[in-house]
Amino acid sequence: EIVLTQSPATLSVSPGERAILSCRASQTVGSDLAWYQQKPGQAPRLLIHHAFIRATGIPARFSGSGSGTEFTLTISSLQSEDFAVYHCQQSDKWPFTFGPGTKVDIK
Amino acid sequence: QEQLVESGGGVVQPGGSLRLSCAASGFPFSDHAMHWVRQAPHKGLECVAVVSDHGSDKHYADSVKGRFTVSRNNSVNTLFLMMNSLTSDDTAVYYCAKEASYGPSFVLWGQGTLVTVSS
């Protein structure tokens, strides 16, 4: 099973600042990496698929990069609605696996 | 409007069984593979099972293999998860999720249904 590691576990950011979240895979997943946002009591929401493609309706302040084993999600200027937990997920090999999540909270 | 609505969760004793349902609407259900993803309290997300668009291909996480069965009825746009021999480790919110047409990302999620395994 491919293990995904996310860092940091918690990221404290002021509104308007940039946030950079990392996801590392235990073996290469090519570009089969997605990012999701999850708020308390809600289901996850797809932000990025295939490492860098924004899902429909996702604001341009969200961007993804990377390939192979190292991936990054960047939120260019944090808005109040962006404070949430972010999960990465690989779909290169079954079982598809998620990282443990990075919580972005208000500094 | 595309929508997934799960039902069937509840409290069940260890060793018991439960069947979850996921009703889909607003999109061509039979065109998409469908997944069950669970999230234990204050834990991460786990892909539990996937079924192909026409139901012929299924895969399971090792943690549920032999105990859970995923199925679908495309004539009524519904996904199912039959869960047997439940243990406390199966306590979680269970989500159904639609796989995107461009690849296995989860583009639509239900609201989730809580399964609690407790005596």
Image: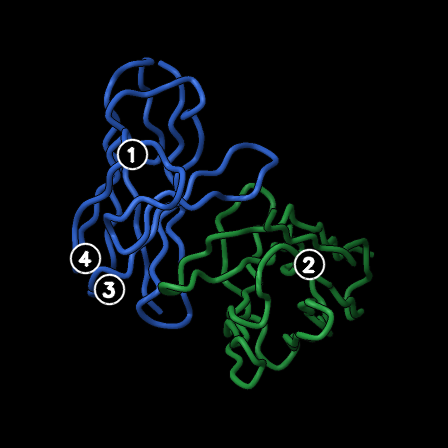
Chain colours: A blue, B green
Residue in the foreground of this view, choosing between A64 and A20: A64
The residue indicated by pointer 2 is B88
Sequence-wise, which precedes: disc 1 or disc 4? Answer: 1
Distance from Cα at disc 2 to Cα at disc 3: 32 Å
Residue in the foreground of this view, choosing between B41 and A87: A87
Write down the chain letter for disc 2: B
Q: Residues within 10 Å of mark 4 (few under 14, many from 20)?
A: some
Q: Which mark is residue A62?
A: 1
Q: Residues within 10 Å of mark 1 (few under 14, many from 20)?
A: many
Single out the mark in the foreground, 4 or 2: 4
Residue in the foreground of this view, choosing between A61 and A70: A61
Sequence-wise, which precedes: disc 3 or disc 4? Answer: 3
Q: Residues within 10 Å of mark 2 (few under 14, many from 20)?
A: some
Q: Which mark is residue B40?
A: none
Residue B26 percent across, percent down from the top left: 62, 54
The residue indicated by pointer 3 is A29
- Disc 2 residue type? Ser
| Residue at 23% over, 22% down | A18
Quarter of the image containing the N terminus of chain A?
bottom left
Label 4: which secondary element: loop
Distance from Cα at disc 3 to Cα at disc 1: 21 Å
Distance from Cα at disc 1 to Cα at disc 4: 20 Å
| Residue A103 to residue B69: above or below | above
- Disc 1 residue type? Phe
Residue B5 percent across, percent down from the top left: 69, 52
- Disc 3 residue type? Val
Q: Which mark is residue A69?
A: 4
Distance from Cα at disc 4 to Cα at disc 2: 33 Å
Q: Residues within 10 Å of mark 3 (few under 14, many from 20)?
A: some
